[in-house]
Amino acid sequence: MMKNKFSVGYSAFRRFIMIIPIFFVVKILFIFMLVSSFSTYEEKFGSTVIKMKSIDPDPVAYDLFPVNVIIEGVGSFDLDVLYTENDLLFINIEDLFRALKVPCTDGVKGISVEGFIGNAYQPYSIDFAKGIIKVGDRTIRTDDKLLKESGILYMESSLFAKAFGIILDFNYRSLTIKLKADFELPVVKQMRLEKIRSNIADIKGEVVVDTLISRDYHLFKFGTLDWSASSFQNWKSAANNAFGLSLGTELLYGEANISMNYFSQYKFDDRQLQYRWNWVDNDKTLIKQAQVGKISVPLISFINAPLVGASIRNSPTTVRKAKGSYIINEIAEPNWTVELYINNVLVDFTTADASGAFRFNVPIVYGFTTLKLKYYGPTGEERTEEREMNVPYTVMATNEFEYGLSAGIVQDGDGSRFGKGEFNYGVNRILTVGGGIEYLSSLPSDGFIPYATATLQPFSRLILNGEYVHGVRSKGVLNYYITKEILLELDYAKYVEGQKVTIFNSNEERKAKLSIPLRYKKINGFFRLDYSQLVYSAFSYNYATAMFSVYYKQFSTNASTQINWVSEKDPFITNDLVLGYRLKNNYVIRSSVRYNASSSSFISYTTELEKRIAKGYLSASFQKNIISDDYYINLGCKYDFSFARTAVSGSQSKFNSGTSISAQGSLAFGAGNGYIHSNNNSSVGKGGIVLYPFLDLNHNGIFDKEEHLVKLSVARANGAKTIISEKDSIVRIPNLNSFTDYVLEFNDSDLSNIAWRFKHNTYKVLVDPNQFMRIDVPILAMGEISGMAYMEKENELKGIGRILIKIYEKNSDKVVVETLSEYDGYIYKLGLKPGEYRACVDPEQLSNLNFIAEPACRYFTIKTSEEGDIVDGIDFILKKNKE
């Protein structure tokens, strides 16, 4: 720093003198003054410079300044160095090894260091008195390359490569050192292991935080409301109106939701009324989940009516990933965004292509699993589909046991009774077995259906699943990843002839699927081939599809072929082609055509045009059905307000006309300060968090009356959107999944005052159902101290760096915090709570340096202040100990 500043000024001055020769004499005088201005180590600080076998007996002048050490893949840190007039760089070896996590301990009298280094953990020692470095069996003798300055041990930078294989590339202009090593540095190894542990923790769903916020239980608390209304007017018939209302509460410590749907053209019955109470506690052992009301249960038998009853399980709702995955392929609307939830946790999302096709690579998770797909239109339309039937595998960790019990009445008009008990057990890391019994009183036999399952996963790319249902079927599924992304699925089921449990009346069911992702530069897509066969006694029905979907920049296309045939008869073949292109100014155009390859004729064609606007879109479409000689024209507009999603459309066909209008939204109560959160998505079944960041003046963690809120610039919550109110400084986080853990993160650098600190930087919050949870976030106003460390020599004071200052509570020997003086002697420390303290120079360091400090300690008080108290004058003068 001193050298850098001087060199810039000197170069400018030199150019000035060369331009004006009349000042030549001044130039000579200046250079003379420059050379004479260098100070020796003894002249500056009066310390001992150890030189062994020195060629030049005179002391060396130097600059002391910090540099930034950069390690690729790790990061950087600051380090104090000495830079001599001979352009030699001396490194603080103890600080460097401490940063690299290399073991390093002081030797006798503080003039040697020793430890272990390298992949083989070779012992090393550096003797500064004798100028000898030993690493394993090697011995290196130095020539004036080891220095001790102010009690700090320094080694010349080139010796690190020779002795330890650590290369230090110093750039004087940027004051940086690029560090490389020919072995795995301990700090690199530590980061690698931490990343592995972090990945394992992510798989297990474990998150390390400093504060846990558990649920706040209530016997009853009302919190959320969903509403919807729609009307369709057909000019040739009566209007069709629909209304929906849902209420969400906490009841008896669980989530209670009730909803009602009314349709003007249908008589109301109890099937239009939905209600369910849901309780979750993943910390329990015997029962982790319970449901009462209209429940959903994985079924073997076919039930085409709601099931009213109760169920309990000991499986958690958390996502614990196992090895492997499987693929689901579905159809949505074109260009819609689709989210995949496993046990109510978002794990992936994708965008449907121009035909609406999409695919997910679903990770296999331990235990009972529920899948949920959420569909979002280009302007935010939402449609949710519960999926509990299509989870093909249940995989358990070794020696883990899960069970489920369900019972209820089927609303089929006959009051059929239903019951089911099931279990799964992890035999070892590759085998899971399960089984159970299902009962349905409406079956013609005794109604009992025993079954057994087994899942075998010898390695992550191969999964085999077998199922035997007594008197119903035997089934096997194979999933095999031919490559990392190409998946082959084989599915075979053989049904007992005459069984009445399922709706299948075929003897056998055979399926084969092949999924191949496509990636080439900027082109993305996938190819899918499906084949299904139903074998009956007299014939077999076959169905095959081939789909090819590609995205390239603004262009998307989807081509598919469907083939149907019965036994040896001629097949019926249809082809579909969809093209989509995103134009400038948010216009999207799509065209599609359907072709009958069997008769070589077109079936229909469609053209659509959309104009995206800020919170909605305008659309126009034309469809022509050639077979029925009909057409369909539609004009529509959708717009999302903050409180509701609305849509208006008008349609015209060859024989009819119609209009429609719809709106839906939700309300969430209890968001603090009388605020009601309105939303255009559903809020029932969701929860929220309300944060009250406040300045905790007395540091008791409680929001007292005399304390006030602090407006935050940012607040982070995983998988959630935070809303910071300009009016009242309250932070609201709505639309969170109930009974799910969320991690909140706060950074001290985001606060408007440098003296403020969050008492806790990370919170793990378990969200209550159908309500906002209040969390007070204390912010502490911390004090700071400043001063100088001086070295006295011949009645002259000069700043001295690397002096360790320890800060204690006033009447205690407990060290609260430590700090080192900077290279110019400046002492600074921020982060002290209000209270009485004493600051002392480290007595051990004083003993090693043979110094005394005046005074030995300084007493000071940090006062309570909103802006943070500042105490200066923490000065110390170090002198040679003459005793």
Image (cartoon, grey):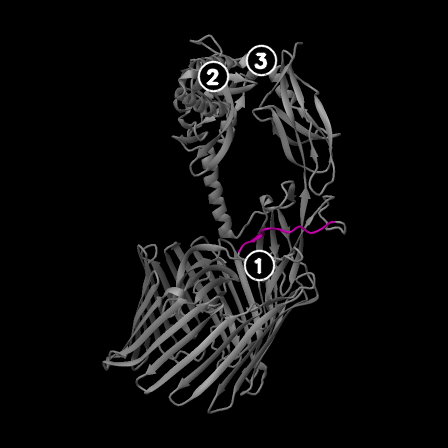
Q: Can you identify the residue that label 1 sits on? A: 740
Callout 1: helix, strand or loop? Answer: loop
What type is the residue that disc 2 sits on?
A: Leu
Image point 50% across, 21% down: which residue? 63
Please tell me in which quadrant of the rendered image residue 351 appears. bottom left
659 lies above or below 251: below
**Disc 3 to disc 2, how far (Cα)?**
18 Å
Instruction: Give me the residue at 46% from left, 10% from top.
Output: 52
> In the image, what residue occupies the spot 38% across and 61% down?
464
What range of the chain is rendered magenta? Answer: 707-718
* Label 3–label 2 contact, CB within 8 A: no
Vertical order, 28 against 670 (above or below) = above
How far separated are the C-alphas under marks 1 and 3? 64 Å
Q: Residues within 10 Å of mark 2 (few under 14, many from 20)?
A: many
Q: Which disc number belongs to residue 49?
A: none
Q: Is residue 474 visible?
A: yes
Q: Pick the residue in front: 130 or 879.
A: 879
User: In which quadrant of the rendered image does the C terminus lie?
Assistant: top right
Q: Main secondary structure of the magenta part?
A: loop
Coordinates of residue 64 in the picture (x, y in percent): 52, 22
Placement of 375 over or under 719, stated as above or below: below
Q: Is residue 808 left or right of residue 740?
A: right
Q: Disc number at residue 46?
A: 3
Q: Is residue 809 magenta?
A: no
Residue 222 position in % (x across, y down) = 67, 68
In depth, the one of 565 and 633 nearer the eye is 633
Q: Amino acid at mark 1?
A: Thr
Of the residues shown, which amino acid type is indicated by label 3? Gly
Q: Which residue is mark 2?
A: 146
